[in-house]
Amino acid sequence: MIDVPPDGWSFATAREPARFSACEVNGAPGVEHAVGARGTLCGKSARHTTRYLHLFDRGAVHSCLRCREKAEAAPTEPSGQERLHDRVQAAAQGRVRDDLLAALRKGARVAVWINGPSAALARRYAKLDELTDGAGPVADALDAAAAIGLARVEDGPWRFIVVLPEDGGCPLVARGPRDLHS
């Protein structure tokens, strides 16, 4: 049985519109297109486009009408909470894992979800010395890998840290008190 939070938040209500990269067709400036797996959503080949470092804005005046229609019709995508929940289910069973899963089902804030150099992520985001449950395995994983994924989830008085190994290994979960004054 899945608990439904009293405010009506659920994975289903939190789904997000599909996102697409933006591009311009070479030789046809001024119109942005949405990029799918094989080219633009309106059918232009990817090899005839220049991609941008931002997402397609379906509401922009300069967006391709056909791409806009296809982007709006695309299926919604899971929220960050749902995607992280799915990953954390593979973590070793325990109270911290179960508490994090419950928090994600209630819509707890995913404050950070990033990949990068383990040492830098540990210093900047993990605050290992403040973790009270599960800190040892999380610290070991951060020491052992050159690069890793890390997520920080905030739920009430708790801050959860999730280490997501890049090799697809089992996630590790730790928690500590959240600094509510920062």
Image (cartoon, rainbow, N blue to C red):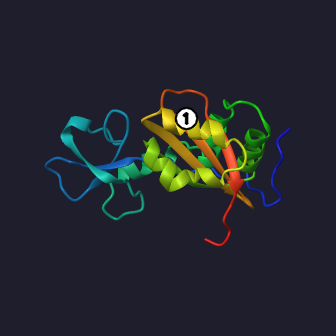
User: Given the current orientation, which residue lies at the most extreme left position?
Assistant: 27
Q: Furthest-bottom residue in view?
A: 181
Residue at image location 74% in from the left, 50% down from the top:
103
Label 1 neighbour load within 10 Å: few <14, some 14-19, many 20+ = some
Three-letter amino acid code at disc 1? Ala
Query: Which residue is under mark 1?
Result: 141
| Image coordinates for residue 110, horizontal then vertical, percent | 61, 53
Whether residue 71 is visible to the viewer of this picture, yes or no, is no
Determine whether, in the image, residue 65 is placed left or right of residue 5. left
Between 87 and 173, the residue placed more toward the observer is 173
Q: Secondary structure at mark 1?
A: helix
Name the side, left or right, on which 16 lies relative to 38.
right
- Quadrant housing the N terminus: top right
Q: Nearer the viewer, residue 125 or 57?
A: 125
* Residue in view at x 66 percent, y 65 percent: 179
Front position in the image: 77 or 114: 114
Left/right placement of residue 109 relative to residue 2 reads: left
Q: Position of residue 15 (x, y in %)?
A: 62, 49
Q: Give percent across and percent down for residue 52.
A: 28, 51
Labels in figure, total: 1
Is 43 above or below relative to 160? above
